Amino acid sequence: MLKNWLKIAFINYRKNWLSTIINVLGLSVGLCVFLLIFIHWQDEKSYEQWIPDRENIYFVENGNASFGMMSSSSYPEIFVLKENFPEIEDATILNDWGKQKLSFNGNSAYVPGTASVDSFFRFFRFEEIAGNFRNALSDKGKIALSMETARLLFGDDYLNAIGKSITNDSNDNKYVVTAIYRLPEGNTVFKPGFIYKNPYLEQSKDQWTSYSYNGFFKIRPGTDIRALENKLSRQMQVQDEIASKKWGLTIDKKNLTMVYLTPINKMKLDARSDGISKGDKKSIMILMGLSVLILALSGINLINLKTAQASQRAKEVGVRKVVGSSKTALVLQFLLETFMICLVAYVVAFAMVELLLPSYNKFLSKDIKLIDPNLFVYTGLLLIVFSLISGLIPALYLSNFKPINTLKGNFARSKNGVWLRNGILTLQLIISSFFIICSLIIHTQVRYMMNKDLGFRGDQVIQINFKKGSWENNFNVKKYKRLKTELARIPGVTDITGSVNSIGNGTANASVVKLSTDTTQTAQTMLGGIDENFLKFYKVKFLAGRDLDWKKASDTINGAVVNETFAGKLGFNPKTALGKEFFTGWDGKKKYTILGVVKDVNYAGVEQTVMPIVYFNYDRNWVKNNMNNLQIKISGKDINGTLARIKEFWTTKAEPGYPYEFEFVDKQFAKTFEKFQKQQTLFTTLNIVVLVIALLGLFALSSLLIEQKLKDVAIKKTLGADEKTIVWDLTKRFLLICVLAVFMSIPFGYYAMNEWLKDFAYRIEMPVWPYILSMLLLLILTFVVVSLKAYRATKINLVKYLKYE
């Protein structure tokens, strides 16, 4: 029986070779898209699976009215609350301080470092290669190295590095190596090249509202996490109230401080804040949903073509029923035929994934490999389920034919198949229209962001961040002043400036200010410590008032220029803000006076609201030690030559022995668009895939249906109908279905894009033209695809189709 079923299947595949190829191709492409997005999702979910007891380790996040949701915690929040609540078994903190240079006997390693405490290794159990994790970070003079860092410093003798002294070039401090560890092989955000004890802990022990550390708790099994979050939140609210009274601030009773605990193995995707190297879960889930739609579209093609071929199989079904075949046997036979197509498509899809994976990895900046056995288990189950769903409808439809009708040839007059095919074709075109609408709106929003006035002119400006820096002994600010003077002598350098917060890098330093005449009026603000020429350098437009005058002591001591958003937050417009005084959170009880108001400048991506900012003389308080960059404007006459001279100076005099890196400020800001440009690219690609699958299905379906109407065409031609009339008669039904599908897709597209646009502080108004263009585009494509086959139908041999059998 199985042998006969296979013979019949291959006969039908060969007979309908075009629709078979289209089915396999459509399913392969649909499965390939789904698999690529699925493996990306699985890769993001696999972070921190290497950590033992991960189900009991939680990342601590905080949210309050002033700073919103934060990925950082305060020192006492982590360690004092650990002592106060028995549910907390252990606690640790860490800070990623970027790359630093370590050296030993002429060897050096420029690697990422982490500042932490001794409990670090109780949470993150790296493999111990040499030394001992116990007390490895018990004091400031100890350091643990990764195996890779140890090799760079000590060569093949790295296992004997324990007890040897190395130098940190950033602060010229010496550290004794206490342990060597192997970094985990699994996906992780924790990849420190070295770990040492945080040197600033003593200063933080009583600062409950100084959110400066990434904190983690190990919770006792069986603890009610929600109840513990409420307990921790109440404790932090008490401390927040104490701090607010100290600084004369008013508590926002509607937005009290809250503490949240996120499982460490879900931190990558589910952190409420920005987390630590957080992934974009929302985009992944949107893409997963869209890939499922594409897969459904492929299944729709299969169902539609199988039901369209029903008339060719009707007599076969009638004969088999007459000779005793059961309905179950017929269903199983047709399911087998569907499964074979799906299996071939599955194999082809995996081959396509393997082929596309290198480019896909480059696009995502990942290194995904097809080695997870669970992937094949999940996709194998998907193959079975997909085959059942897409095969069951045509199988039941075909097996329900009545022998008396099919053997008499009356099947063609049945309207059931027509309604089923039209309904499925409508669904297919709804999905296609939905994708076109969404792609056009995404493209419009991204273009709007890229063309938005950013409030500054950064052309021909490069930024160089210090690789070697220190907050001790005013090292950073001394280095800034010295290098600024020396770089100004290089031919081709036209101007130099610096700032605490740099354009394109978002908020590095923030605080809260309050109006001196009404301390209930507060605003969270960026610390705009700037050099004298910063606002002129970037041609920032003044809306009212004037710039800081570096020759006036009053301007440099307590004068300030604020942006338009700052003025609005305190209840003023640019003109009425002039002369107003406010207290800051970074300079004690000293009053600052507003001398000027400038147009808003985007420091982060344009999807984010512009933050209030106070521009002031960087050299009048502790902020000066955050001047760790130089922004250099170069002449347009010899850009390459100037860049070469700057590089030579930097690598030989400014920071010898360090990698040289710079970024054009325009490109630096352009990086904030990358996420949305990638979304645009992915959605455009998916849209093309959808259209290809839908049009292939439409072509195959129209071919089958028009072939069934060739006798009608022959009769009409005999009666004198011209080719235009015949083509229109064969095409108009598909066009009507297309119009109906577009109208039905509009509410889905509107809802989806309205939700997507909610993420943007600066967004377009929902346009009408994408919906109209979607209809026109689909109508044109549908007409072209169907009319080609319809036109060929007008060239048939009339005698062949008019003869009576």
Image (spheres, rainbow, N blue to C red):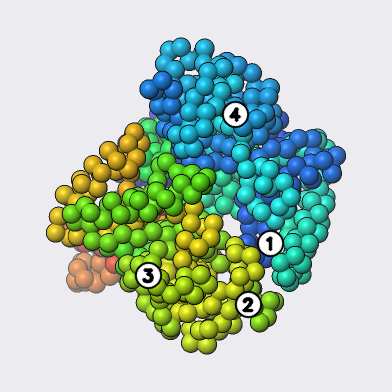
Circle 1 sits in a helix, a strand or a loop, which is it? strand
Q: How crowded is mark 4: few (under 14 residues within 10 Å), some or many (20 or more)?
A: some
Circle 3 sits in a helix, a strand or a loop, which is it? helix
Check disc 3 and give the amino acid type: Leu
Of callouts 4 and 1, which one flags the residue occurring earlier in the amino acid sequence? 1
CA distance separating discs 3 and 2: 24 Å
Farthest residue to the left: give it.
Answer: 637
Of callouts 1 and 3, which one flags the residue occurring earlier in the amino acid sequence? 1
Of callouts 2 and 1, which one flags the residue occurring earlier in the amino acid sequence? 1
Residue assigned mark 3:
535
CA distance separating discs 3 and 4: 43 Å
CA distance separating discs 2 and 1: 20 Å
Q: Residues within 10 Å of mark 1 (few under 14, many from 20)?
A: some
Residue assigned mark 2:
515
Residue ID at (43%, 66%) = 602
Q: Which of marks 4 and 1 is in front?
A: 4
Check disc 4 and give the amino acid type: Gly
Of callouts 3 and 4, which one flags the residue occurring earlier in the amino acid sequence? 4
Are the residues tagged 3 and 2 within 8 Å (C-beta)?
no
Circle 2 sits in a helix, a strand or a loop, which is it? strand
Q: Which of marks 1 and 3 is in front?
A: 3
Residue 19 picture location, percent across and down: 34, 45
Q: How crowded is mark 3: few (under 14 residues within 10 Å), some or many (20 or more)?
A: some
In-image side of 363 versus 374 (left or right) = left
Residue 502 picture location, percent across and down: 42, 58
CA distance separating discs 4 and 2: 45 Å
Q: Which of marks 2 and 1 is in front?
A: 2
Of callouts 3 and 2, which one flags the residue occurring earlier in the amino acid sequence? 2
Give the label on residue 64, or none: 1
In this rendered view, identify the residue nearer to me: 769 or 521.
Answer: 521
Residue assigned mark 4:
141
Residue 242 in sight? yes
